[in-house]
Image: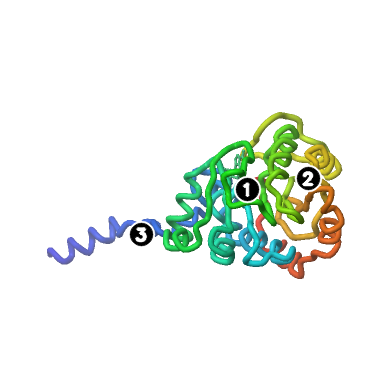
Amino acid sequence: MQKMRERLAAFIAPDPPEPPDPVEDLGRGLKPGSEHYRAFVGPPEDYDLLAGIQAGLLFACGLREDHHVADVGCGSLRAGRLLIPYLRRGHYTGLDPNAWLIDKAIEHEIGHDLIRLKAPAFVHNEDFDLSEGHGPFDFILAQSVFSHTYPDMTTNGLRSLTTQLAPGGKIVATFATGKENTEGSGWAYPVCVQYKPEHLFELAERAGLCAFPLDWPHPRQRWFVAAAPEDRASAESLAASVRSPATETIGRSARRRSAG
Ligand SMILES: C[S@@+](CC[C@H](N)C(=O)[O-])C[C@H]1O[C@@H](n2cnc3c(N)ncnc32)[C@H](O)[C@@H]1O
């Protein structure tokens, strides 16, 4: 009788589903911008893909372990989790006003041993100020950052980054294209600020840079390279030569959403 009662109870109230693994909670299904370290920076389903796309582009642009790299708006170290192990000790700088994203990335993605070994610098401000980082920089990466800045912040941000470029250094960044330029001031998130490409390049010029489109895959945005006027020729030749062998494959495997 007792056994039958137990079986009946199990049938009526089955075991609750397993809670998600707290160490490997990938945030899948959450909207971009949600308060989860992977979802905050874009569709969590594309977190890994955007890591590979960013690191792949820097390698295609000639990245070596001796270079100094700044990852502006580094978020939860989507690119950093590949770049920090690759670069030499003290050669990676991440800038993000949201320190919690970096803390979560250390906890869930890269661990404290790597931080001790590679000594990356992390700086937190909203002014694109890299002066406390491990600069000057051979590459300044800004993935899905200028897709959230209105023209005033785009120009000021680029101007500030320009001061931290090493001789020959390049800014490699994305923006969101649109038929019209979005009007406004400051920062917008998780919605995107859209630019006609020629307007974005004009803002870069106002910041003292010359900028060129880069033919590199991205599920939602466009890449560009920018450099100081004296490095115009090398930026232009980079833009002419960098091509991804995997544009179509990557395009097919990415989801189409708004942010990140
Ligand atoms: C769409 S996420 C991209 C993050 C990262 N680049 C990546 O590829 O995962 C935008 C990031 O910009 C950061 N951010 C917000 N305001 C910023 C500012 N003023 N300067 C730099 N980054 C900022 C956000 O905290 C967020 O991590």
Q: Nearer the viewer, residue 254 or 200?
A: 200
Q: Is residue 247 left or right of residue 122?
A: right
Image depth: mark 1 or mark 3 in front:
1
Position of residue 112 relative to residue 203, above or below, is below
**Residue 100 higher or lower than 50, as above or below:** above
SS for callout 2: strand
Which residue is identified by label 3?
18
Q: Residues within 10 Å of mark 2 (few under 14, many from 20)?
A: some
Hey, what amino acid is under mark 3? Glu
| Image coordinates for residue 241, horizontal then vertical, percent | 83, 65
Q: Nearer the viewer, mark 1 or mark 2?
A: 1
Instruction: Select label 2 or label 3 by which is in front.
Output: 2
Report if the beta carbon of the residue with label 1 is closer than 8 angstroms to ligand 1.
Answer: yes
Outermost residue on the left side: it is 1
Q: Residue at x 86, y 43 (%)?
A: 198
Q: Tag 2 or tag 1, which sits nearer the N-term? A: 1
Farthest residue in the bottom direction?
A: 245
Residue 115 in the image, given as x and y percentages of width and height: 46, 58
At 39% from the left and 59% from the top, the residue drawn is: 21
| Residue type marked 2 | Thr
Mark before the other along the chain sequence, 1 or 3: 3
User: CB under 8 Å between callouts 1 and 2?
Assistant: no
In the image, what residue type sits under mark 1?
A: Val
Report, in whole angstroms, how far the alpha carbon at label 1 lies from the one at label 3. 38 Å
At horizontal 61% and vertical 60% (from top left) the residue drawn is 51
User: Tag 3: Cα neighbours inside 10 Å, few (<14), some, or many (≥20)?
Assistant: few
Q: Is residue 139 visible?
A: yes
Residue under numbered circle 2:
177
User: Nearest the camera: 8 or 120?
Assistant: 120
> What whole-number distance in Å separates the C-alpha atoms at marks 1 and 2?
20 Å
Q: Which mark is residue 72?
A: 1
